[in-house]
Amino acid sequence: MPSIGFVLPHWMFWAALAVFPPIAWAMFLRTRNRPDDGKANNFLAYLFWLMAGFLGMHRFYLKSIWGVLYLPLFVVVIWGGHLFGEAREELSKARQDVESATRITDRSKAAAGRGDAAAQRRLADGETKLIAAKASYARAESEIDHANLVMRGAAGMVLLLLLIDAVLLPAMVRRARESEPAPVVSTVEPHLIEDPPPEVPGVAGTVARTIDTVVRVLGELVAYWAVLAVFAYYFEVIGRYVFNSPTNWVHESTFLMFGMQYMIAGAYAYRGESHVRVDLIYSKLSARGKATCDLIGSIFFFIFIGSMLWTGWIFAADAVRGGEVSFTEWGIQYWPVKLTIPLGAGLLLAQGIARVIKDAHTAATARA
């Protein structure tokens, strides 16, 4: 199979985590109030071109039958990869035969020169095997060159078609939009209903609202990391099952990314009442009763979060001082990951303070 051989640089991983969420959020805010007509658009067309253009998916997305041109070329690439794999195995076997025959002839030359009949027979047999092994080695090299020529020729044609389509895509999208019928849009628009927190007056209320805003923004930003995981695993599947080039970084990068997301978004989940709660009795209480119950429970919450913040800071400080990296072949830095432990605990602590402010206000003002 043709090999991809791409290893994600560490700086690119950290840059993607920092840069992608604000860009994705800005794109969302830009299009939030625009009605979606359900027709083809440039963004999706270029996304298909980038991620699955070698299969002509961007053409099929725009309902162009010319996408079938990509399919036989892709089959040729796979066929060339099959030839390459077989030739590589033959080359490895021929190399071993050459080395074995060379050792036999080298060891037999001295004894054969002294007139040892057995050594002379071994030398002659070794020389015969060496000639055959070298011929097999040359044939395998020729087959590898042929397989590379097949793959590179088909891949070059695919690349040429992709470059041409990159220029033609905007016009193709316009034609597709003109030919598509107007979609039937439901009059019932799904929307998220969120209970607004009580408006706490004064400085305490300002603090609570500021914490809410910071936690919400961070939670929404790291949520976009899940999109990066989709792209990473798509690359892994294509690399592993199409090009026989499994990566040594996709799985590790994604579980580290989701671990950091889990820590940073913990306060966001707490803010939205998304943590598990046994509410057999709690659900039957009044607003004042719930607030009082939350205030009592917050004592244990702060004990837990304080312990988490302290121990997490120790883990993170040790990792920073030692410049800790993973023990895998990829060797990514671990200390930024461990820094999210005290960061997540700090956000939970701040959100807990905001919750106490709101519960105290509810307990003092709500009716029993």
Image (cartoon, grey):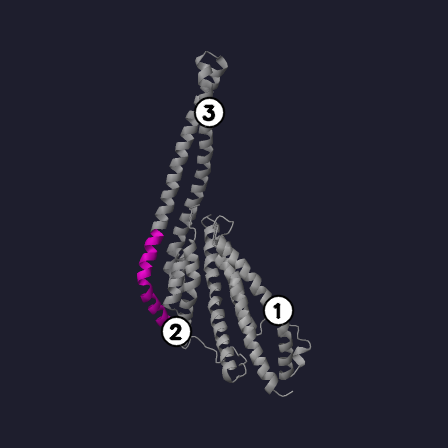
How many neighbours does mark 3 have within 10 angstroms: few (below 14), some (14-19), or many (20 or more)? few
Q: Which mark is residue 30?
A: 2
Q: Residue at x 53, y 64 (%)?
A: 342
Do we see residue 63 in this rendering? no
In primary-sequence order, the first of circles 3 and 2 is 2
CA–CA distance between discs 2 and 1? 42 Å
What is the secondary structure assignment of the residue under circle 2?
Answer: helix
Q: Residue 275: x percent and y percent? A: 59, 70
In the image shown, does 126 or 169 lie closer to the viewer?
126
Q: Give the label, 3 or 1, closer to the camera.
A: 1
Q: Amino acid at mark 3?
A: Arg
Most distant residue in the right direction: 281
Q: Residue at x 42, y 61 (%)?
A: 16
How many neighbours does mark 2 have within 10 angstroms: few (below 14), some (14-19), or many (20 or more)? few
Up the image or down, 368 lies above or below 30; here it is: below
Examine the structure image and report whether residue 82 is included in the region drawn in magenta. no
Q: Residue 280: x percent and y percent? A: 68, 76
Task: Give yes or no for contact between labels 3 and 2 (Cβ–Cβ under 8 Å).
Answer: no
Q: Which mark is residue 223?
A: none
In the image shown, does 256 or 99 lie closer to the viewer?
256
Magenta segment range? 157-181
Up the image or down, 276 lies above or below 93; here it is: below
What is the secondary structure assignment of the residue under circle 3?
Answer: helix
Q: Which mark is residue 303?
A: 1
Up the image or down, 146 lies above or below 281; here it is: above
Quarter the N terminus occupies? top left
In primary-sequence order, the first of circles 3 and 1 is 3
